[in-house]
Amino acid sequence: NAGVTQTPKFRILKIGQSMTLQCTQDMNHNYMYWYRQDPGMGLKLIYYSVGAGITDKGEVPNGYNVSRSTTEDFPLRLELAAPSQTSVYFCASSYSGTGPTDTQYFGPGTRLTVL
Amino acid sequence: GENVEQHPSTLSVQEGDSAVIKCTYSDSASNYFPWYKQELGKRPQLIIDIRSNVGEKKDQRIAVTLNKTAKHFSLHITETQPEDSAVYFCAASPPKSYNNNDMRFGAGTRLTVKP
């Protein structure tokens, strides 16, 4: 299994540009998450999804959109990039069935700079 | 929503000494408490976790303790080694039956182990 993969690894955007960060997992996990990590800070949840077709806002959703059309993919969309969105973005997934398993597995991250 | 505080923000120890990192959480319904280790430029990786029906859990040199009454939990690393140097994050997560399914992270502790 490749686990959680993210593309691209790095990206520089100009203010006002748009882009989509891709996230794919091959572990058949039902839960998927997007976090951002600002320099020297912890992880803040942007959006999460409990299954295909279901998404919900996290702590810092403004300026982002997500969709979950398949179990495997959970893309994050930035519509009008702003310097405040300069950060490292991590996608994660976990399995939550009848048991209490909540371990989140993280992707390698996407380093985004908005100039 | 849940709020997690983590202390200290930086910790420096001599090789072979013990290190303790403490976290407090606000939502008494939270029932899952993982600890992640993040090396520079890498993704967070789970090192140990504990659930609310357990008071302590050990895995070789690392242990986690949970005090539900006081709403705090701690990470203990014994016989520290230079490769333990990293940023450590605690997190707290509510039960999956909640409407709010997001996990909240502490701000992180930068641990430096001096040889």
Image (cartoon, grey):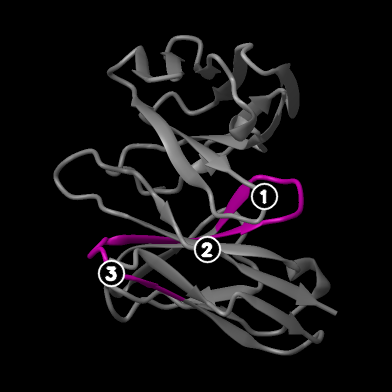
Q: How many labels, in total?
A: 3
Question: Dividing the picture into quarters, in which one does residue A80 lie?
Answer: bottom right
Residue B72 x %, y %:
52, 17
| Whether label 1 touches label 2, CB < 8 Å | no
Mark 3 → mark 2, Cα distance in angstroms: 15 Å
The residue drawn where x is 36% and y is 49% is B99
Badge number at residue A108: 2
On the question of residue B33 being in view, the answer is: no
Question: Of helix, strand and loop, which one carries label 3?
Answer: loop
Q: Please tell me whether mark 3 or mark 1 is closer to you in this view.
A: 1
Is the same chain shared between marks 1 and 2? no
Is the same chain shared between marks 3 and 1? no
Question: Of helix, strand and loop, which one carries label 1?
Answer: loop
Q: Amino acid at mark 2?
A: Pro
The disc, 3 or 2, on the residue closer to the chain's N-terminal end is 3
Q: Which of B96 and B79 lies nearest the eye of the viewer?
A: B79
- Asked if residue A64 is positioned above or below residue B48 in the image, the reply reads below
Residue A70 x %, y %:
28, 79
Is the same chain shared between marks 3 and 2? yes
Q: Does A80 sit left or right of A35 as displayed?
A: right
- Asked if residue B108 is positioned above or below residue A98 in the image, the reply reads above
The residue drawn where x is 66% and y is 76% is A10
Q: Does A58 sit left or right of A27 as displayed?
A: right
Local packing at callout 2 (Cα closer than 10 Å; few below 14, some 14-19, many 20+) is many
Q: Which residues are magenta?
A: A23-45
Question: Of helix, strand and loop, which one carries label 2?
Answer: loop
Q: Which residue is mark 3?
A: A26
Q: Which residue is mark 1?
A: B40
Q: Amino acid at mark 3?
A: Asp
Mark 3 belongs to chain:
A
Q: Is residue A30 magenta?
A: yes
Q: Amino acid at mark 1?
A: Leu
